[in-house]
Amino acid sequence: MKRWMLVGGLGGFFALALIATAPATLLDAKLQDASNGRLRLAEARGTLWSGAGLIEIRDERGRSGLAKPVTWRFLPFALLRARLAYEVELDHDSRPFPVALTWSGIELADADISLPAMALGQAVPKLAALGLTGDMHLQIPEFVIGRNAVRGRATMQWRNAGSALSPVSPLGGYELRISAEGSAIRTVLHTLQGPLQLDGNGLWATDGQSGFSATARMPAELQPQLAPFLRLIAVERGDGSFELQLN
C-alpha cells in the first residue's frame, strides 16, 4: 500500500511538473480546436502554469481583427476534476474570472468583458463595413462551449451605439440576451434607449436553422436622415420600418 501511495505521489508530482514547464503555445491549440478557429492566443509567452499573450477574435475566414491583452494563472486543484482551470484577466484592469479547458470544450463563469463595437463586425461580416462605434459590455454568468453542444446564458449591452455612415449619433443603447442549450443558441434584442428602436430575435443551430431578424423604427422627423443609412443593410417596409435579416 505504501509503495502504491509513493508511486501515485510521484506520478502527481510529475504531472504538475509537466504543466508547470509546458509552453503557453499549447493553450492556443486548445482554444483553436474548441472554438473552430474563432479564438486564438497570439504572442503567447510563459507556460501553462502562468503566462500572457493576446486573445484574438477571428472572423469566419480565420482573419484576426480584434485582440486584447490577457494573462492567466493556473489553478492546480482543478486537476482533481480532470480539467485545466485558470484565473484569467483581460486588459490588466478588469476583474479576473475563471476559465476551464476540458476534453469536451471551454467553460467560462462570472465574466465581465468590455469590447469595442467593431467586435460585432468580426462576428457578423455583413456589419463590418458600417464602421460601428460605441462600447459593448458582455456579462457571462455561465457558458460552456463544446464540440457539438453549448449551454449557458449571457447578456451583451451596446451603449452609445453608432456608425461611421450614420448622420445621427448616437443611435441608441441596446441589449442582446443570449441563451444556449444543446445544439442551439437563441438571442433576443431590445432597445434600452435612443431614437433608433431595434427589436428582434435569432437562432443559431447546428442543424442549419440559423438566422437573425430585427425590426428598426424611428421618429418620423428622423426618417429622412436615417432611411438612407438603413437601406444599406435592411429592407424598407410600407409602414416606415426596416427589416434586417442576418444569416
Image (spheres, rainbow, N blue to C red):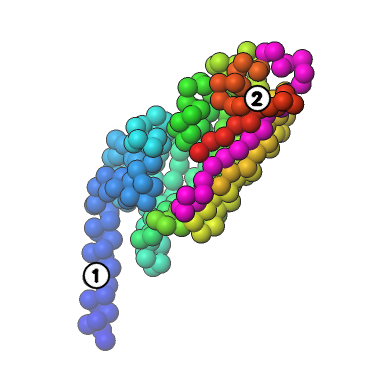
Determine whether, in the image, residue 9 is placed left or right of residue 105: left
Q: Is residue 195 left or right of residue 21?
A: right
Image position, residue 38 (x, y; %)? 38, 41
Tell me, yes or no, if residue 124 can be seen here.
yes
In the displayed structure image, the side of residue 147 where residue 180 appears, left or right? right
- In the rendered image, is residue 154 in sight? no
Q: Nearer the viewer, residue 148 or 32?
A: 148
Pointer 2: residues within 10 angstroms few (<14), some, or many (20+)? some
Residue 17, placed above or below residue 9: above
The residue carrying mark 1 is: 11
| Quarter that holds the N terminus | bottom left
Label located before the other in sequence (2 or 1): 1
Per the rendered image, the range of residues in magenta is 204-225
Compared with residue 120, is residue 102 higher up or lower down, i.e. above or below? below
Residue farthest right in this picture = 220
Which is in the foreground here, disc 2 or disc 1?
2
- Which quadrant would residue 187 be assigned to in this image? top right
Compared to residue 164, the image places residue 88 above or below, namely below
Q: Amino acid at mark 2?
A: Glu
Where disc 2 sits, the SS reads strand
- From the image, tell me which residue sits under label 2: 236
Q: Residue at x 60, y 31 (%)?
A: 244
Q: Amino acid at mark 1?
A: Gly
Q: 167 and 213: which one is in front? A: 213
Left or right of 232 on screen, residue 239: right
Question: Where residue 40 sits: x, y (%)?
Answer: 35, 40
* Residue 74 lies in the magenta-colored region: no
At a point 77% along the width and 18% down the height, the residue shown is 220
Q: CA distance from mark 2 to mark 1?
A: 66 Å
**Disc 1, SS:** helix
Q: Residue at x 60, y 38 (%)?
A: 213
